[in-house]
Image (tube, grey):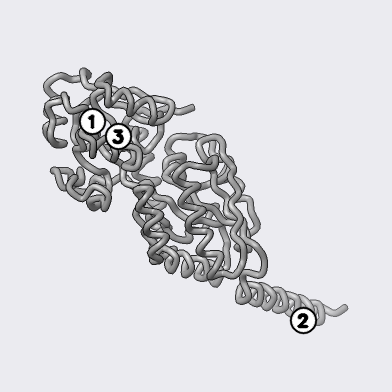
């Protein structure tokens, strides 16, 4: 075989391969799509994933099968997403742990910035700063003033080390230049019970687990960590508008796939995600969980991941947080 004929055959092979890839992308999807959720069934990530997948399946005309892969703070399932073939038939729904883990875990089995394709932010579940009613603080500035008057005397609870509540508090401590002592619990249930009982005065936790107690007057809401006020508690100001511009903590539930997804597949999935997040029944389902739909572009989602990873690496380093 001559060099020219070999090159011709190679060129033909490459062209055929590219044509095949494009044809597959244009006809996508032709079989069910697996949606990996890196947590056990029943939590916020699982509920959000199931609500979105059920309606996306209708538009895609293929099943979207939820695959719960809990373990290691979300890294087991997230690694499975990273290792999947980049054909659009394995994607995932991740939570804020996706951007927290690079700061909290020194030996992740994947690279958060290189091993995934961002498909779009799905929802945000704002975190709430609340106190026991006996604490003489009606807003964030008064809480910080109390802490400054008696350094190291004020405790705050969270659902555990490295959780959204924990990092929300550490970011506020850094911005406000004051101290509170972290009391980590194994989940939010007992922590909230102790907050209501007055055993602990301060707590950061998601709105869904706090809202009923706020409305009953058992705890006092001081601020939400999101960039804008929560639809569930519109009377509660953001922490940013109480003298801390730029303060924001997002739960960041996002849809991702493995690196290298074809652009046509990315656009198809993102388009369906955005469409579904506008549906009244999906928005109502989200509202019942305290979640607020987002539905941005893949580029905006990728930028969000980059900025969040950088932010939390600094916060965790400055606070000296260790989870391993």
Give the residue number, with chain letter if any, for mark 3: 204
Badge 2: how crowded within 10 Å, few (<14), some, or many (20+)?
A: few
Horizontally, residue 265 falls left or right of residue 10, namely: left
Residue 54 appearing in the image:
yes
Compare marks 1 and 3 and give the one earlier in the sequence: 3
Q: CA distance from mark 3 to mark 2?
A: 64 Å
Residue 172 appearing in the image:
no
Q: How many marks?
A: 3
The label shown at residue 8 is: 2
Viewer-proximal residue among 218 and 28: 218
Horizontally, residue 203 falls left or right of residue 281, namely: left
Labels 3 and 2 touching (C-beta < 8 A): no
Image spot of residue 138 (x, y percent) = 12, 34
Viewer-proximal residue among 248 and 198: 198
Q: Can you say whether 170 is above or below 121 in the image?
A: above
Image spot of residue 34 (x, y percent) = 62, 56
- Residue drawn at point x = 61 percent, y = 71 percent: 28
Give the residue number, with chain letter if any, for mark 1: 218
Image spot of residue 273 (x, y percent) = 46, 64
- Residue drawn at point x = 59 percent, y = 70 percent: 61
Q: CA distance from mark 1 to mark 3?
A: 15 Å
Element class at badge 2:
helix
Horizontally, residue 132 falls left or right of residue 125, namely: left
Q: Nearer the viewer, mark 1 or mark 3?
A: 1
Q: CA distance from mark 2 to mark 1?
A: 77 Å
User: Which quadrant is the N terminus positioned in?
Assistant: bottom right
- Residue drawn at point x = 55 percent, y = 68 percent: 58
Compare marks 3 and 2 and give the one earlier in the sequence: 2
Element class at badge 3:
strand
The label shown at residue 39 is: none
Viewer-proximal residue among 19 and 127: 127
- Residue drawn at point x = 19 percent, y = 45 percent: 236
């Amino acid at each position: 075989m001559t060099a020219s004929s070999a090159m011709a055959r190679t060129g033909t092979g490459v062209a055929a391969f590219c044509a095949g890839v494009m044809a597959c992308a244009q006809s996508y999807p032709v079989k069910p799509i697996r949606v990996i959720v890196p947590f056990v069934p029943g939590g916020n990530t699982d509920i959000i994933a199931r609500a979105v997948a059920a309606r996306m399946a209708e538009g895609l005309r293929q099943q979207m099968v939820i695959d719960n892969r809990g373990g290691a703070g979300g890294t087991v399932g997230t690694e499975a997403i990273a290792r999947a073939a980049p054909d659009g038939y394995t994607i995932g729904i991740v939570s804020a742990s996706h951007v927290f883990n690079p700061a909290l875990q020194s030996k992740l089995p994947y690279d958060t910035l290189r091993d995934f394709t961002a498909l779009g932010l799905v929802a945000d579940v704002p975190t709430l700063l609340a106190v026991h009613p006996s604490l003489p603080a009606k807003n964030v500035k008064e809480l910080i003033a109390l802490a400054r008057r008696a350094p190291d005397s004020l405790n705050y609870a969270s659902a555990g080390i490295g959780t959204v509540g924990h990092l929300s508090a550490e970011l506020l401590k850094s911005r406000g230049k004051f101290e509170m002592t972290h009391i980590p619990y194994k989940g939010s249930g007992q922590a909230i019970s102790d907050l209501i009982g007055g055993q602990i005065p301060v707590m950061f936790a998601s709105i869904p687990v706090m809202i009923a107690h706020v409305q009953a007057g058992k705890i006092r809401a001081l601020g939400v960590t999101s960039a804008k006020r929560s639809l569930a508690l519109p009377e509660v100001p953001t922490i940013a508008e109480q003298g801390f511009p730029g303060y924001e903590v997002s739960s960041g539930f996002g849809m991702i796939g493995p690196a290298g997804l074809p652009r046509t597949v990315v656009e198809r999935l993102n388009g369906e995600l955005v469409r579904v997040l506008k549906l009244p029944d999906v928005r109502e389902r989200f509202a019942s969980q305290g979640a607020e739909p987002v539905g941005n572009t893949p580029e905006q989602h990728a930028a969000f991941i980059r900025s969040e990873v950088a932010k939390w690496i600094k916060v965790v380093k400055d606070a000296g947080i260790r989870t391993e």
